[in-house]
Amino acid sequence: MLEIKYRGPLTPQQTKKLIRYFSKKAKRLFSGQEKVLFLDTTIFPSIGDFHTGFSRVSLKRSGNAITVRIKEGNPSAVKREELSFTIAKKEWKPFLYFLNALGLRSGYYRPSFRHIYQLGQIRFSLKTRSAIGDHFEMELPSEEHLASPAVQGLLSEFGLQVWSKEAYQKRIAQGMKAFPAIAVTEAKLTE
């Protein structure tokens, strides 16, 4: 599935205003704790590593399932191909054994609190308590959609700025320094 996603910083005031706005105007898809572990894939040159990011392999827990994802391309790119499958929480230990057998023993644990809304063709996420700071993620059907009056009006109304690729890469690097890799077994995905 092709993912087209833009991100940018959020202040606490913007977050509150956006939650009020989306509560009235959009469909809420999710609100709660999200736990993500980005696997350190340095041992697989064809995948790349967390820094260069040819691809990113991650485990994401929302609710009682864990989604295994791979996103092709640099993590700061707007457009990336995403493939995923879901495992039940009860399958975590066998899957952990599988990861260890492949040599995937560490990763970058990134819990956050997320609100996800659907507003027409826009999927808008507000992420707080994140390793890279509070920010929004906006998924659109095409790159051209960013210039649409609806999207530009939303960005303007709430004073939102989309990060450049360089600014987002800098945020990722800062988050990695502040919160280094941990053993996969230490990630609290099933708790």
Image (cartoon, grey):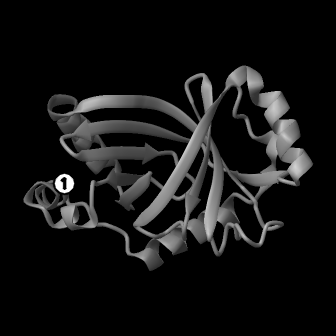
The answer to whether 69 appears left or right of 20 in the picture is right
**Rendered location of residue 173, percent (x, y):** 61, 71
**Rendered location of residue 76, percent (x, y):** 49, 69
- The picture quadrant where one finds residue 28 is top left
- Tell me the amino acid under the disc marked 1: Phe
In the displayed structure, 105 sits above or below 45; it is above
Residue at disc 1, secondary structure: loop
Residue furthest out toward the left:
149
The answer to whether 104 appears left or right of 12 in the picture is right
Q: Who's the residue at 37% across and 45% down the image?
A: 126
Residue furthest out toward the bottom:
166
Nearer to us in this view, 45 or 112: 45
The answer to whether 103 appears left or right of 41 in the picture is right
In the displayed structure, 97 sits above or below 52; it is above
**Rendered location of residue 142, percent (x, y):** 27, 61
Q: How many labels does the image show?
A: 1
**Rendered location of residue 48, percent (x, y):** 70, 70
- The picture quadrant where one finds residue 61 is top right
Q: Who's the residue at 62% across and 48% down the image?
A: 110
**Quarter of the figure with the C terminus:** top right
In this figure, which residue is indicated by the disc labeled 1? 158
Nearer to us in this view, 81 or 149: 81
Residue furthest out toward the right:
101
